[in-house]
Image (cartoon, rainbow, N blue to C red):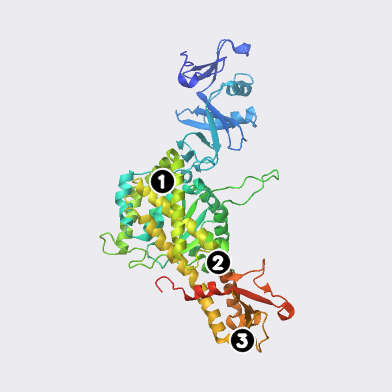
Amino acid sequence: MKDLTTEDEYTNLPVGYMATERGISLVGDNEFEDFAEGPWLCSRIQVLGSGCRENGTDWGRVVEITDPRGAKHVVCLFNANSATEHLKILKSRGLRINADVPRVDKVLAKLLTEWNTPDQYLFVDRLGWADDACTTFTFAADKHIGTKKIFLMCDTGNEMRRHVKGSLDDWKTSVAALCVGNPVMVFSVSIALAAPFMQLLNRDSFTVHLRGRSSCGKTTALRVANSVWNPPCGLQNWRTTSNGLESVAVAANSTLLTLDELGQVSATAADEASYMLGNERGKRRARTDGSGSPCKTWKLIALSSGEISLAEKVSEGGKVTKLGQEVRFIDIEADTYAHGIFSNLCGEPDGNALAKKLNAAVKATFGTPGYAMVKFLTVHQKKVTAIASSFIDVWLSEQASLTPGGLDGPGSRVAQNFAIIAAAGEIATAKGFTDWPKGAAKDAATELFKRWLAAREKPVREISREILNFADRNTNKIETLGQSAIPDRVGYHDTEHLYLSSVSWKRIFTQDQSRTALTCLSDSGVLVRAGTHFSTKMGRSVPNRERHYKLLKEKLRKLAESDALNE
């Protein structure tokens, strides 16, 4: 019997056990006297280390087993489980044991308990950043980048693995090069590159939705963005159930989730899914003992496509989207260029030919840009975080200065997301991950943010104009607060505000339009709310202190006079 105990993997083998070519055997000084001659105990097994979750729970040992075919399996044996449960797990992975050894489960448990190694593992149950400090990134159960040893405590099927094909140079030449001059394509790829920045910068997950007519190139944009991290099969469809969406969101943690064809899902499912993705957690479910199991969580960016907006989809179910949804689910009209989503055909005869070329390219090369970006982030985290934060501040300042009246709360939140996307694209370009011209990612983000802002402001602008037209037609019927009463009064005003009664409001807007108008004006900072009320209770100079809608005159006029993009 050849003694292998001195080999590297067995240098910490406890006293009383010996490594052999067959696996592990007992030796003479083992406490089990009947087997002092050294009978064989089990096939090859090795304790790699111990570990726990980041919060210090679920301690256990990471063990490697070699099955009869020679394949290796790594499992975790949690301290809270019994020796019998451990043995069941090990046997299911191919461990062979000597059933003639009395109390073999306890003998094996003693071996594993006393087999101490210095290596410490962090237990995680999803791919992506393994810890809050973003020191280590998990691509698969056996593939990590960073400083910590990781044990992935979940099924590691194809949906839980980041595949790589081709080289980064291949991807840059055949994919990234065809994005140049096409803002939607550059922006989509930058979204994918921005995903690992979300946890670094402590930002909330969000979705970008590319809206446009059929066959304009939307799905191609999703495929190209998806190629930063995944093979073509990584592209998901909105038709998945809410439970299924939880799983794919967890699998896409710290990376990009692509969802094609919003129109194919029900209004209720779209409504619920948009909330769930932005809330970064799934449903809480009960265990068999009645206790609650941990929620599935994630942090990511989703890129969606469809012929209709989320608001249109949700309206099919008789509901309206809320402000929080529209901020976290950013709708962009994508097909406004000369060739659908394309403005530069890169030498191809038409947009369809360019889309075909891109679709073929992403089948041949994928995954390398995401890997390169994560490797760079783990090595230079502090420096990159500082650069990205500085870029974001400057970009936001530029956008605010170019926006009449500045950015309101919702506009600022969306601008933050566009800024992260622009920063990631520019950092990737500076490091040679895209070969784009400097400023391409920034310019694409700026152009599409202006497009989003204009689309959002258009209804507010029209609403503001309706109100001002009404006020101009009734100038002699708007009373100055504190002055003499005017016959047939339609409202009041002071130096800063215009006050309109509900009766006057109904003369401007229909019942269906009224709520939308109030919400738009409130979101834009034109309407001054009184707590949860749209209307404000007037002062004592107004009869019965009747409630009125209080509007900021200067901001109302600025919005009414502003021009839409390309209008």
User: Label 2 neighbourhood size at 10 Å, few (<14), some (14-19), many (20+)?
Assistant: some
Q: Secondary structure at mark 3?
A: helix
Name which residue type carries label 3.
Lys
Please tell me whether residue 465 is drawn above or below residue 352 in the rendered image. below
Q: Does residue 173 appear left or right of residue 251 in this picture?
A: left
- The mark lying in front, picked from 3 and 2, is 3
Give the position of the C terminus as an image quadrant: bottom left
| Residue at image mark 3 | 477
Front disc: 1 or 2: 1
Residue found 47% across the figure and 48% down from its top: 197
Q: Is residue 161 left or right of residue 507?
A: left
Q: Nearer the viewer, residue 128 or 30?
A: 128
Image spot of residue 418 (x, y percent): 45, 57
User: Is 499 located above or below residue 268 in the figure?
Assistant: below
Three-letter amino acid code of the residue under disc 2: Val
Circle 2 sits on which residue? 314
In terms of sequence position, does the residue under pointer 1 or pointer 2 come before the other? 2
Q: Quadrant of residue 75?
A: top right
Q: Is residue 43 above or below residue 424?
A: above
Is 386 left or right of 116, judged from the image as shown?
A: left
Query: What residue would you read off at disc 1?
Result: 370
| Location of residue 456 in the rendering, given as x and y in whole percent from the top left corner | 49, 68
Residue situated in front as seen by the camera: 36 or 412? 412
Task: Evaluate if marks 3 and 2 touch, with contact meaning CB atoms under 8 Å apart.
Answer: no
Q: With 128 as the anchor, is 504 left or right in this view?
A: right
Q: CA distance from mark 1 to mark 2?
A: 33 Å
Nearest the viewer among 524 and 49 is: 524
> Type of residue at label 1?
Gly
Of circles 3 and 1, the one toward us is 3
Q: Residues within 10 Å of mark 1 (few under 14, many from 20)?
A: many
Task: Let me know if residue 163 appears in the view.
Answer: no
Between the residue at mark 3 and the residue at mark 2, the CA separation in whole angstroms equals: 40 Å
